[in-house]
Amino acid sequence: MTAYDPPQWFDARGRVLLPEAATKGRTNLAGQVRGGSEDLPVLLHESRAFVASPTGVEVVDLADGRTVGQEAASGEALGKDRDGYVLPPVLAGGEVLVPFLLTVPASGTYTARAAVELVAVSTTAPYKAAWRTTIKLPEWAAKASGKVQAAAVGAENGTAVVTVTGGDEAVSYGIDTASRTVRWTQPGMEAVHTGTGMAAGLFHAEPLTYVPIGVDLVTGTEKWRGEKTYAAIMDVAGPGTVRVAGPQVGEKDDRLLDVTNGEPRATMPPGLRSAGCTYDRVATLVCMHGFTVAAVDAASGSLLWSLKPDEAGRTPPKVTEVWHGRVYGRAVGGPVALDARTGADLPTPPRAVPLLVNEYAGLVLDDNRLYGYPAGG
């Protein structure tokens, strides 16, 4: 497969079918992905797709659709019908981190418990586990098994971070990747970002009330704490940067924070506090709110452009993916690509509407199944 960064278009002639686990339990009657494409249990890495399920992970060659590797969880999955609750794996150097929620059977006088198993799968053939470790979870995880999610957040300098949430409960762990042991535990913390020696996330203080916090990646020691925010959200907004906002905060409280100290780097433009924004992994946040699409500079927080319905004779597209300076989506005239920095229509139509993109392929939803389309241009 040939790399294009970013791809201009996607070739349906070379499409390959991904495993059913990629979309099982995730589409609605309209054939759309519930919860957004960023939560699909799929990681694209070079010309491979790592597809996670409640019980294992499959590695698919996007050139021909062959399954070239697979690894299974070491125990029984926690709860039933967990399809649709698995989050995407995360790339950490030469490994892909995949968390599995497991049931620890009752033994003797001990009742059954929940556990999270973190498996590091090699990014090279035969795509087997380089290491794995299992951590017993608090009692609330077993009681709320149908609502529990586990996320691999990332890894840096020998520490991997995994977080488990369920309702208003959360817990995060820092794991030594050499000894495969837990370095630290942060009850109540939903980790979102790792990098620059820190793990940043939201502390579940009260029902639907969260506090932004940052902890040292090696020791787990809390380094900073923000203010309580009702229904807060935190998203990655760049290297060492997170966005914290909430529907009840004022416009000035929709901020980009430095994860090293919790200090604001920039304030988001007015009117976007309830908009979901996606970082293009280069320099731009593309935000969607209702039928409006806007772009913000990830460093300065300044508004780059905004496209509203019937403005200047244009109709905003339904954005499906943002990657390396390009916005992909569906417009009134079919698949479209925009320049993420200017909002201008690009001259080459992408021919398909991808949900996930890298330099080798776009993943496209068709009849509730996910297909890999080779990149072109």
Image (cartoon, grey):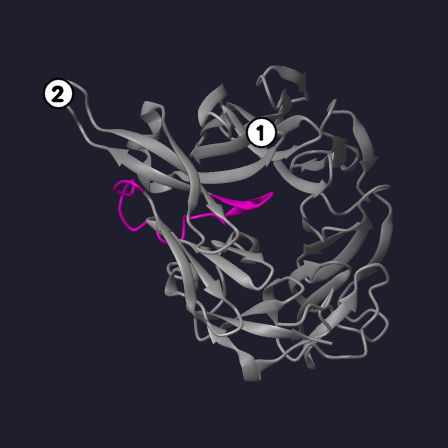
**Side of 106 relative to 227 (left or right):** left
Question: Where residue 99 sits: x, y (%)?
Answer: 43, 41
Residue 232 shows up from this direction: no
Question: Where residue 217 sits: x, y (%)?
Answer: 61, 24
- Nearer-N-terminus badge (1/2): 2
**Side of 26 relative to 319 (left or right):** left
Badge 2 is on which residue?
Answer: 108
Q: Residue at x 67, y 16 (%)?
A: 223
Question: Where residue 15 sits: x, y (%)?
Answer: 52, 78
Q: What residue type is labelled 2?
A: Gly
Query: Residues at badges 1 and 2 in contact (C-beta under 8 Å)?
Result: no
| Main secondary structure along the magenta-highlighted residues | loop
Badge 1 is on which residue?
Answer: 158
The stretch in magenta equals 74-97
Q: Residue at x 63, y 35 (%)?
A: 193
- The Cα atoms of the two marked residues, 1 and 2, are separated by 36 Å
